């Protein structure tokens, strides 16, 4: 097990990384502003579940295979870019109408099936970004000490700490963005602009991911 001091330092670094602009927190911000904080928290949960997979891949040595295979890396990133482009298309085509705007609150009930759908979107968003996997492969082992036991176990513990930091930071972003979205959703014009901005953000993320190199 890593020492308490190591875990504390790692948690601090993870919080700073969560606050720095990136695809995941931008995704949370835009979805929360469009559809409310509850949907945003579902997306956050999905992103964190994706981190579980990335952590396990690093601990089991599977991440190294992706890092070493240009074909796998390219296939994953193109799937992610296509998914983001699909989200952009949906946002750009969306049209708000009086009385039909998705209020970010109790007026737009979040059913279990709908919640699972948004959790799934968060998982897909995270898993189709190979840069997260490569980052974990390079980042997590730096805080593991072979003298303190199994490196794989330490990596899993560090991954859990990283997920806790992401849950707290992204959760705060979801709640703040969701509250701001409520104000915008009172206006059809503002809602239409929000949809356009979301579409452009997703499109930019798609292009960026498609062009990313290992």
Image (cartoon, rainbow, N blue to C red):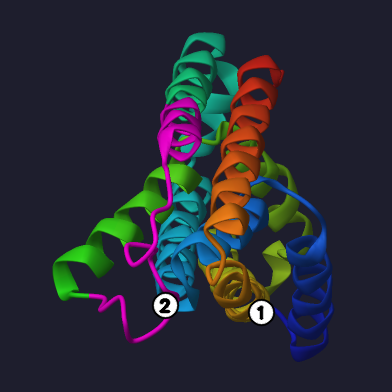
Q: Which residue lies at the image location 63% right of the left edge and 26% below the top edge? A: 209
First of labels 2, 1 by sequence position? 2
Q: Nearest the camera: 198 or 144?
A: 198
Above or below residue 103? Residue 77 is above
| Outermost residue to the front | 98
The reply to whether discs 2 and 1 touch (Cβ–Cβ < 8 Å) is no
Please rate how many residues cluster around mark 1, counting C-alpha atoms within 10 Å: few if below 14, some from 14 to 19, many from 20.
some
- On the image, the x and y values in percent for residue 122 come to 42, 54
- On the image, the x and y values in percent for residue 195 come to 54, 46
- On the image, the x and y values in percent for residue 100 come to 32, 62
Q: Nearest the camera: 136 or 79?
A: 79
Q: Which residue lies at the image location 66% right of the left edge and 73% below the top edge? A: 173
Q: Which residues are magenta?
A: 83-110
Tell me the tag on residue 38.
2
SS for dot 2:
helix
Tell me the tag on residue 176.
1
Q: Main secondary structure of the magenta part?
A: loop
SS for dot 1:
helix
Q: Quarter of the image holding residue 129?
A: top right
Q: Is residue 51 magenta?
A: no
**Residue 167 visible (yes or no):** no
């Amino acid at each position: 097990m890593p020492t308490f001091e190591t875990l504390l330092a790692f948690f601090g670094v993870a919080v700073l990384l969560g606050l720095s602009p990136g695809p995941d927190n931008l995704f949370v911000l835009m979805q929360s502003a469009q559809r409310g904080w509850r949907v945003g928290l579902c997306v956050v949960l999905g992103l964190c579940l994706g981190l579980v997979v990335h952590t396990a891949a690093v601990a089991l040595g599977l991440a190294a295979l992706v890092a070493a295979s240009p074909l796998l890396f390219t296939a994953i990133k193109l799937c992610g870019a296509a998914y983001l482009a699909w989200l952009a298309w949906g946002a750009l085509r969306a049209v708000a109408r009086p009385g039909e705007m998705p209020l970010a609150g109790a007026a737009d009930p979040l059913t279990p099936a709908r919640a699972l759908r948004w959790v799934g979107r968060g998982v897909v968003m995270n898993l189709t970004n190979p840069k997260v996997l490569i980052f974990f492969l390079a980042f997590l082992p730096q805080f593991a000490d072979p003298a303190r036991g199994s490196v794989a176990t330490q990596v899993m513990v560090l991954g859990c700490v990283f997920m806790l930091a992401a849950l707290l930071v992204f959760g705060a972003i979801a709640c703040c963005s969701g509250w701001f979205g409520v104000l915008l959703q009172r206006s059809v014009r503002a809602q239409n602009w929000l949809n356009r901005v979301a579409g452009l953000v997703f499109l930019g993320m798609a292009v960026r991911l498609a062009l990313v190199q290992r």
